[in-house]
Image (cartoon, helix red, strand yellow):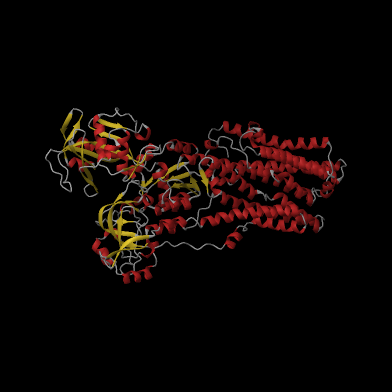
Amino acid sequence: MTSQSTGASSTATKPALWHALASDDVFARLSSGPGGLSTAESARRLTDAGPNELSFAGATPWWRVVLRQFISPLIGILLAAAVVTLIQQHWVDSVAIFLVLSLNAALGFFQERKAEADVRALQSLSTPSCRVLRDGTERVVPGRDVVPGDVVLLESGERVPADLRLFESNGLQLDESMLTGEPFAATKHTEPLPPDTGDADRANIAFSGTFVGSGRGKGLVIATGAGTALGEINALVQGPPGKSPLQELTHSLERRIGLIILAALVFIFIAGLVLGNDVSTMFRTSVGLAVATIPESLPIVLTVALSLGVSRMAKRNAIIRTLPAVETLGSTNVIGSDKTGTLTENRLTVERIWTTAGLLDITAGTDGTDGDQTSDPALVRAVLRAGALTNEATLSSEDEGLEYSGDAVDAAMAKTAVARSAVTERDRTAEPLAHQPYEPHLRYSQTVHTDAQGRRTLYVKGSPEAVMNAAGTMAREDGEVPLDQALIHAANEAMGRDGLRVIATGSRILDPGEELPAPLPPPSGLTFLGMEGMTDPPRAGVADAIARCRQAGIKVMMITGDHPVTATAIACRLGMSTDKPALTGSEMADLDDHMLAARLEQTSVAARVSPVEKLRIVHALQSVGKVVAVTGDGVNDAPALKAAAIGVAMGTSGTDVAREAADVVLTDDNFVTIVHAVEEGRVTFAAIRKTTYFLLSTGTGALVAVTLSVFADTPLLFLPVQMLWMNVVTNGVQDIALAFEPGEGDELNRPPRPPSDGILSRTLWFRAGITGAWMALAVILSFIAALHAGYPEIQARTLALTMFVMLSFFQVFSSRAENKSLFQLRLLANKPLLYTSLAALALHWAVMTWPVSAGLLELTPLTAWEWLLCAAVGSTVLIIVEAEKAARRWSHRNDPSGVPR
C-alpha cells in the first residue's frame, strides 16, 4: 500500500517515504503550501498526472472468448464427428453433439466474461466530490479532479478522495477496516514516523477510499488514481484469475482421451483396410466408434452436476458465482480466512470487567449480558456506569437487542452498561453539565453529571495509564484505598496478553463550589474504579466449524491485518494451533518464497499483513501444491480472493469489491457455512467422478470390443449405425441422471482428494480397466459364440448389442458408490437414474420389435431366453465390481493407515 506521488513537479515524481517526512518537507517536495494550489497550477497538474480515478483493462472481444472454448483435442474430435454425421444425415446424433458443444462453450464464455466484472465494484469507492483549498479558499471539486499537492479538508462522515499526508488533525479517526482488517478506528496524527513503519501503522497517512469516523483534519495529496493504496489493490485484482482444480483436471483428461481415441481410430481404420475391408465401411465404422467411445456428454454432465451443487449450496446460504467453485471447495486443503467480520463478529464487545474484587468474565450470557439487574457487584456497576456516561454513542436500534452507533469503544461500553442495568438509556443521554470528548493525544475523555442525590460527579474513561496518572485512590468493596499501580498494571497486561483492548474508568465527586471551566481542566484526584476489556469476539459455531475442517483434512489459517497479539488470542479461542508465533508482514520481507512456504507450514496465523503480502501468502501455498480457498469481506481481501483457487466473500457485511472478486458469497456471513459448502463440494465432485468412470468404462468396452472384432476372423461386430444407436441407448441420459447421486455420508471423514488423482482415482482407473475389458470380452465372445451356433449375422449382432446394453445397465448402478457396496444404498435415492435406465431398456426393446426401426438399425427381436442370457451376463459386471470393493474394504480394515483412493 506504499503510496508514491504522481505529481507534476520533478520532486514529486521521485519515490518518497511520505510518512517519514515532516510536513514542511512534504510541502516543499510537492511545491505546495497550507493554502493549497492555485486554480491554474491544479489544472496543469491534472493534465500531467491524469484524473484521480482507477484504470480498468479493456474487455476482450466476445468472439475471441467464444473461439477459446473450442481449443481442445476432445472438442475437435467431436466437431469432426458432428460434421461427418451431419453429412451422413444422422440428424439426431448431429444435433445432440452440436447442442453439447454449444452448452459447453456457453458455460466457458460466461466464466471468462465474469472475470472482467471483478473490478467494477472498486469504482464505487471513488469519491464523487470533496473539499479542497484552491487559491486559499475552500472549494468543492469532483474527486477525479484532485491532484498531487492539493490540500484536502476532512470531516466526520466523508470519504478520503486520495492518499494524503496529514498536516492538521483534531481528534481525527479513520475507519480503515477495508484495508487493514482492524475493527478499531485508526487514530491519526501529523508527526513523522520511522521509515520502516508498516502500512497499517502509518498514522499520519489517510488512505484513499477510507472513511472519516470522527474529528477533523487537513492533508496534502501525495498520490492519486493508480498511485494510491486503493489503486495498487485495483492492479492486483485485474490480474489473471486462478484456475480451478476441476478446470485443470478436465483439460488434462480431455487431452488424454482425445489423443488415445484418435490414435485408436487411426489404428482401427488402417488395420481394417489391411485386413480387406473397404474404405467406406471402415471410415463409417471409425466415425461411429468415435461417437460411441468419446464421452461427448461429459461437458453437460459437468454442468448438470455443478448446477445441482449450486442449488444445494444456495439452500445452505452459499451463493455460487462460478460453477467450478462448487467442486473446488470439495478439493480445498487450506482455507485462508480473514479475521475481522469472517471469524469474528466485526463488533467490539466487552468481555471482562476488572475491579479490585477480581475479574468478571461476562461472555457466558447472551451478547455478553445476563440481563439480571442485581447480579453485578456494586464495583462492577460503578465501572460500567462511568464508561456509559463518558460516552458519545447513540442508540440506533432496540428491535433486535440494543444496537449503538458511533465510536466502536463507546458503543461497546454503552451497550454493556445499559443491558446489565448499570445505567438507564435516559440517564446516559441526559445533558451533561460539562463534557470533553476523547482526544487521542490526551488518551481520555471526561464528563460531569448530576447523580440521584444531586451531587456533581466527574467521570473519566481512557487508557489505564492516563486514568492512573489522574487518580490517587482506588475503589474497594469496603471503601477507597491508596492506588496500587503494580496491581493495576498486572491486570492490564494480563488482559492485553489475551488480545483485549483495555479501557479504564475513574470518578470524583466535585466540591459544591467547584467551578466547571470550559474546556475542563485535566482530571485529578480520581478514584480508580476498574477496567473493561473488550475485543471483537469469535462468531458462534466457528470453533466447531474449524474442528470439522481439521477432521476433513483442511488446514484453516487466519490471515489478517490486525495486531499479532489480538490475532493469536482469537486463534487460540477458535482452537487453531498457536504453538508457533504468528507470521508478520515485516518477517515476510526477510523470507524468500521457499522459506515463506516452510514458515506457513508451521503457523496458523499471519498478522499485520498488507494486501500484497496476503497475495504472496496465497501464491506461496499454491507453489507447494496446496488448493487454497480464501475468505474475506474487505477491499484488502480482494486480490487474494481473486488469486486463490476459490474466493469466499461475506454477503451482508462484505464490501462490493470482495463480493465481485469472489467465487462464492455467504449470505449469512458465517464461516460455519463454509463447512457445509465443502461437504456439498465433495458430493458434487464424487458425482462427477462416478459419471466419468461410467462413461470411460463403457467407452473402453466398446473400443476394445470393436478393435478385437476387426482382428477376429468374423464379420464386423457392430455396423456404424448400430454404434450410433448404442451411444444413445447406453449413456444417452443415464450418465446425466448419475449426476443426481446424493452423497455417501462420509464426505467430511476423508481427507481432501490428492491433486495427483485427477478426476478418477487410482482405484477407479483400475476398476474402469477391468470392467471395460470384461465388457468387451463378454460382447465379442457372445458374438463369436452366436455365429458358431449358426445364428445369422443380424441376430448375432442384435444379441451382442443387447449384451452390451445390459452390461451398461448394471455398470451404471455399480457406479453409484465408489467405496460402499451398491446394496448399502437405497434403490430410490436416485430416482432419475432408475427411471432413465429402465426407460433405455424399454426403448431398446421397442426399437428391436418395431419393424421400421429394426430395419433401419438392422436388428431383429430376441427371444425371452436370449434376453435372460443377456441380463445374466450383464449382471456379471456388478459381481466383479462388488468383489473388488469387498477386497479393498478388507484390505483397509487390516491396514488402518490405508486411505480409500
Residue 806 in the image, given as x and y percentages of width and height: 75, 39
Q: Give the residue drawn at x 16%, y 45%.
A: 522
| Residue 387 location, quadrant | top left
From this viewpoint, which residue is outermost toward the left? 513
Asked if residue 154 lies left or right of residue 667, the reply is left
Does residue 36 sit above or below 691 in this rendering? below
Residue 116 in the image, given as x and y percentages of width and height: 51, 58
Does residue 239 sit above or below 319 in this rendering? below
The answer to whether residue 128 is seen in the rendering is yes
The answer to whether residue 9 is seen in the rendering is no
Residue 238 in the image, given as x and y percentages of width and height: 47, 58
Quarter of the image with the N terminus is bottom left
| Residue 765 location, quadrant | top right
Quarter of the image with the C terminus is top right
Residue 331 in the image, given as x and y percentages of width and height: 53, 44
Asked if residue 526 lies left or right of residue 60, the reply is left
512 vs 706, nearest the viewer: 512
Asked if residue 501 lies left or right of residue 254, the reply is left
